[in-house]
Image: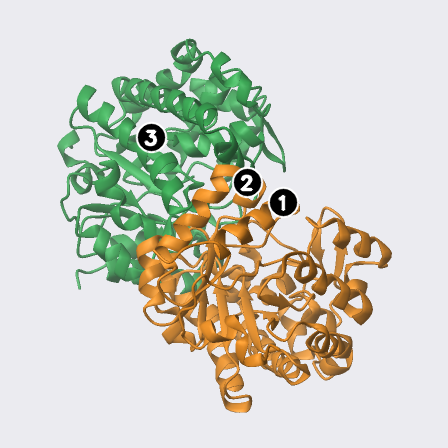
Chain colours: A green, B orange
């Protein structure tokens, strides 16, 4: 009989080196899986899928059943917080997420009081997941980082470099700061509620960290994440946090110490020397190029071997450097897992 | 009377520290200028503007007349090489560049023999520019880096992370290598012809360097640029090359030594410590966040001061960290130039 103490991902998050490393994939519950597409088709819309525990539990468990990943990540979206703020969030097929862009004078009117009520189905999903998952499987909760969530709230949609939010921050620094503070508080509330519902650890996704200058990165990306981590440390001590600042490049060097995260997510562009340097401070997660899951074959094998060679000697959660794409072949996931789990300590 | 020996940009490219630093802006001949929009409206299309020396000379000179920049950059586009390869390149308003995507089996059929014939109007533009520009103004030629040009040739358009080209390279490494080699040879031919027509120095734009893993960056971004620089050094010794690998992050550290470029372009996300480290090896160019040209005011002033404080003590060509955007206010360019030229050595 296994026990929660056997959760390999948790061991790595505590700084232990486990080899072969535990593995899960960002967006592992997603469109590359036929069973996901089937469940998705039965939901009215994408948010409906997130807010219906029966369906969200099902899609979260699908990749665990099929592949036996070492961690499950709650099926939800980083934009449920703006949705809880009545920003008219919708997901239009082929268009990406949309919502009503917010103007500087409306930020003071945002009302976060319905957060837990609005997101209670998500907490229910987490509770059921922890009950249904194998004991040895880590359950991860997550949220979007305040900066990344703010970029969508300001532009109303994704853009190539989130210029609308960057410009908004330059033109209306006080309103922008107010928005970030609000999102920081709500994100911490949200993660703590996920923890209370059964999440073993949480990940903060800062998908748009890479468009910021050093000064703005410190203020808009690092500072809110630091405040969220501090609240978790204070209010739910011992629950580890993974920080994933995609595209942060050289600025990732001090991300762990600056934010207090237990584990630093690495995208596929992080060079080996920098990744190893970051790993000297503790756990890292990543960083296979997700396109190798589409290409398969030798491209996949070489990529896996390179990650293991670079980071396998220290605390590593094997993952991709970004979410698995709809074009990925599920057969390649099987191949990936076999290669990682079959790896011999070098 | 001024002489070519007074070209400040050339002094910096030779490694000299000039303070206040010389200044020009990427895309300085562009849509933020009313006189550009007027000339643009008189051309049949964007490529027509590039290929009509009367018009291309005019738009290149407009920002020099208005602002007295220290360098003029040839008005053209990085996609004139695919256009010379008959890829049906077109620029559709609001859609960005489009061309026919190339399949792996068609790469061997690409015919570069018409390069110089096709691009002779560009060379004519360079000749006229050198004759018409003030003596002290440096004339820059340019091309796209083979990797960046290849991404468009493969996808047929821009994408958020140029996944089609990355995947193509994984799936068809030999065909991809053949394409890169061809683009490398043609780019070197093209830059050398620009030099012979009167360009004082050239810049290689690798706008999509930031989506590559370390290994792919070395093979696809660095190696072709290195070969272009080697050819220029051999065939036109003494002509400096600026390399701009946008988004390369921590991989920029060794870019100068790896490619042989004389000057490293820095985007606005490069941290101060890395920028200063790169500057120890020679000239750098950049790196004000282009959105500060839209925001203006204190945001602009603080940004300018930060660049000067970080990089003003060494060889610096003041520039933005990417092209100036259509939303920028020309008044902010005046303000920028006054602030840079009025800066006191600290």
Q: Residue at x 71, y 48 (%)?
A: B95
In the depicted view, which residue is nearer to us: B172 or B86?
B86
Q: Are marks 2 and 1 in contact (CB under 8 Å)?
A: yes
Answer yes or no: is residue A3 visible.
no
What residue did someone put label 2 on? B296
Q: Left or right: where does residue A140 sit relative to residue B216?
A: left
In the depicted view, which residue is nearer to us: B276 or A196?
B276
Share a chain, discs 2 and 1?
Answer: yes
Tell me residue A36's x, y (percent): 49, 34
Q: Residue at x 56, y 49 (%)?
A: B160
Q: Tag 1: Cα neighbours inside 10 Å, few (<14), some, or many (≥20)?
A: few
Tell me residue A118's x, y (percent): 44, 12
Single out the mark in the foreground, 2 or 3: 2
Q: Left or right: where does residue B40 sit relative to residue B206?
A: right
Label 2, secondary structure: give it: loop
Answer yes or no: is residue B123 visible.
yes
Position of residue B207 relative to residue B81, above or below, is above
**Earlier sequence position, callout 2 versus callout 1:** 2
Q: CA distance from mark 3 to mark 1?
A: 34 Å
Q: Quadrant of the N terminus of chain B?
A: bottom right
Tell me residue B184's x, y (percent): 57, 78
What residue did someone put label 3 on? A224
**Disc 2 chain ID:** B
Q: Tag 3: Cα neighbours inside 10 Å, few (<14), some, or many (≥20)?
A: many
What residue did someone put label 1 on? B331
Label 1, secondary structure: give it: helix
């Amino acid at each position: 009989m296994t026990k929660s103490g056997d959760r390999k991902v948790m061991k790595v998050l505590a700084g232990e080196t486990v080899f072969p490393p535990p593995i899960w994939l960002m967006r592992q519950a997603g469109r590359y899986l036929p069973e996901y597409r089937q469940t998705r088709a039965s939901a009215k819309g994408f948010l409906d899928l997130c807010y219906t525990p029966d369906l969200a539990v099902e899609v979260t468990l699908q990749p665990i059943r099929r592949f036996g990943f070492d961690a499950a990540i709650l099926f939800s979206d980083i934009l449920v917080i703006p949705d809880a703020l009545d920003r008219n969030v919708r997901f239009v097929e082929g268009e990406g997420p949309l919502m009503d862009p917010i103007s500087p004078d409306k930020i003071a009117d945002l009302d976060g009081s319905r957060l837990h009520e609005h997101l209670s189905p998500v907490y229910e999903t987490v509770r059921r997941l922890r009950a249904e998952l194998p004991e040895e499987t880590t359950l991860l909760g997550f949220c979007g980082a305040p900066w990344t969530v703010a970029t969508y709230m300001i532009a109303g949609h994704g853009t190539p470099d989130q210029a609308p939010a960057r410009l908004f921050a330059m033109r209306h620094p006080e309103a922008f700061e107010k928005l970030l503070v609000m999102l920081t508080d709500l994100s911490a509330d949200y993660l703590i509620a996920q923890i209370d519902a059964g999440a073993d650890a949480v990940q903060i996704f800062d998908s748009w960290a890479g468009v910021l200058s050093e000064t703005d990165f410190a203020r808009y990306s690092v500072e809110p994440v630091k405040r969220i981590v501090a609240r978790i440390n204070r209010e739910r001590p011992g629950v580890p946090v993974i920080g994933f600042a995609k595209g942060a490049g050289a600025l990732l060097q001090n991300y762990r110490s600056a934010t207090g995260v237990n584990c630093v997510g690495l995208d596929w562009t992080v060079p080996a020397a920098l990744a190893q340097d970051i790993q000297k401070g503790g756990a890292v997660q990543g960083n296979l190029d997700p396109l190798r899951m589409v290409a398969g074959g030798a491209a996949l094998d070489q990529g896996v071997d390179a990650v293991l060679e670079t980071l396998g000697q220290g605390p590593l959660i094997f993952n991709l450097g970004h979410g698995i794409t709809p074009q990925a072949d599920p057969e390649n996931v099987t191949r990936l897992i076999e290669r990682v789990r079959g790896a011999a300590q070098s």
